[in-house]
Amino acid sequence: MKSVTLGIIREGKTPPDFRVPLTPAQCAAAQSQFPGLTILVQPSPIRRVADKEYLDAGIELREDLSVCDILLGVKEVPLDMLIPGKTYLFFSHTIKKQPHNAKLLKAILEKKIRLIDYETLRGTDGKRLIGFGRYAGIVGAYEGFRTFGKKHKLYELKSPSDCHDRSEMEREMKKIVLPSDFRLVVTGFGRVGHGAREILSILPVKEVSAKDFFTVKFSEPVFVHLDTHEYYERHKDGGFEKRDFYTNPDHYFSVLPSFLRRSDMYMACHLWASGNPPLIERHDLEVADWKCKVIADISCDTNGPIASTIRASKIADPDYGYHRLHHIECDLAEPEAIAVMAIDNLPCELPRDSSEDFGQELVKHIFPLILGEDPDNIIWKASETTLDGELTPHFEYLRDYALNA
């Protein structure tokens, strides 16, 4: 391997992000694993992993990273912090033409920066190679139960952001007391959904089938984890075919509300495409026998598939009330209020743990490709721009979005 200098940049976005792409131990291990690799870290007063921890691991701190070939961050980089002519890896939030980041992509092109967006790094099977989804599920599930305790005045949990790490957060969960007839519905089987299951496995909540959820009376807390075919049905015959659903989503409708009329809490961990049928519409919430009073929208698609998710919530103010009859935001204590938890940056609440999890995937899946051979051109396919200041063919659709910013 040729000599490569890699820099970890200071996060500059507002509000600040406390995560890092690599922990000190991962930096040291990567330098040992990949001969010729040197890692420098830009000092930061805000990240949860202190500068001293990098120094103690033998990693050099350096303010000026202009000597680096590759720069790693987590979130969007402020325009004035971009170094021309470098290769960057971070979550740019540009591939869906997000309006607030058009100027960022334009600046990247003007500065002749090669942008590799973590979100676009996919294996030959089309699945994402890296992300914070697991910890979104872990923290989101905890925040959901925190909101449940608040809504029903059953218990109070500390914010994850006030916990030193995941271990302290899990110790807080000993305070959770659920009604004997508690019922929970979960959707989504990706990284987010499996992360949420890690939290459910700690609680005395039994998993049951979709059929039993409807037909059996339980005397203990239970949850059902629904797959797509269990909450969508075809209009004409009530059936479901996966290929047909993704080809003709308008031929299907959601039966999720029938589950939520029998549940106390809903945890949304699914990936929802904009062309898919909505999951919960306003009229679904207005029925007299509606029971679900807490929705933890971990996926956080605002004004999308779930009518009650009218905005994202923040770490400092994690939930809000949604009046199911008037369809306006209201006090959480209102009898007809659905308590909505929709924090849009959940992994930030456990920055040390989520950074370690992310860094493991980065070193395992991405470093061998970007520092060595890449026979399947995974890095090239994930590159939005080139060092010549051009969009790559895969992202040519972003041209008007960027140049007209």
Image (tube, rainbow, N blue to C red):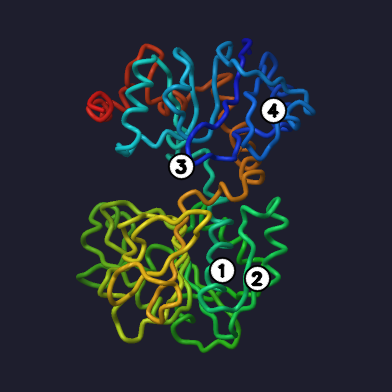
**Quadrant showing the C terminus:** top left
- Residue 178 image point, x, y percent: 60, 79
Instruction: Please report contact status of discs 3 and 2: CB closer than 8 Å, yes or no.
Output: no
Secondary structure at badge 4 equals helix
Spatial separation of the CA atoms under disc 4 and disc 1: 35 Å
* Circle number at residue 203: 2
SS category of the residue bearing label 3: loop
Tag 2: amino acid: Leu
Q: Is residue 69 above or below residue 237?
A: above
Say left or right for 343 vs 173.
left
Image side of residue 198 versus residue 325, left or right: right
Task: Answer yes or no: is residue 121 visible.
Answer: no
First in sequence, mark 3 or 2: give its number.
3
Q: CA distance from mark 3 to mark 2?
A: 30 Å
Task: Give the vertical position of 63 relative to 119 (above or below).
Answer: above
How many angstroms separate mark 4 from mark 2 (CA)?
35 Å
Kindly identify which residue carries mark 4: 27
Q: Which mark is residue 145?
A: 1
- Mark 4 surroundings: few (<14), some (14-19) or many (≥20) residues within 10 A: many
> How far apart are the two marked residues, 2 and 1, measured between alpha carbons?
10 Å
- For label 3, the crowd category at 10 Å Cα-Cα, with few meaning under 14, some 14 to 19 and many 20 or more, is few
Q: Is residue 33 above or below residue 149?
A: above
Q: Earlier in the sequence, mark 4 or mark 1?
A: 4
Of residue 310 and residue 181, the one placed in the foreground of this image is 310
Q: Which residue is mark 3?
A: 127
Task: Give the alpha-carbon distance from disc 1 to disc 3, as whole Å.
Answer: 30 Å
Quarter location, residue 37: top right
Find residue 206 and report its horizontal and vertical position in percent.
60, 75
Q: The residue tagged with tag 2: helix, strand or loop?
A: loop
Of pointers 2 and 1, the one earlier in the residue sequence: 1
- Do the residues under discs 2 and 1 have CB atoms within 8 angstroms? yes
Answer few, some or many: residues within 10 Å of disc 1's Cα (few below 14, many 20 plus, some between 14 and 19): many
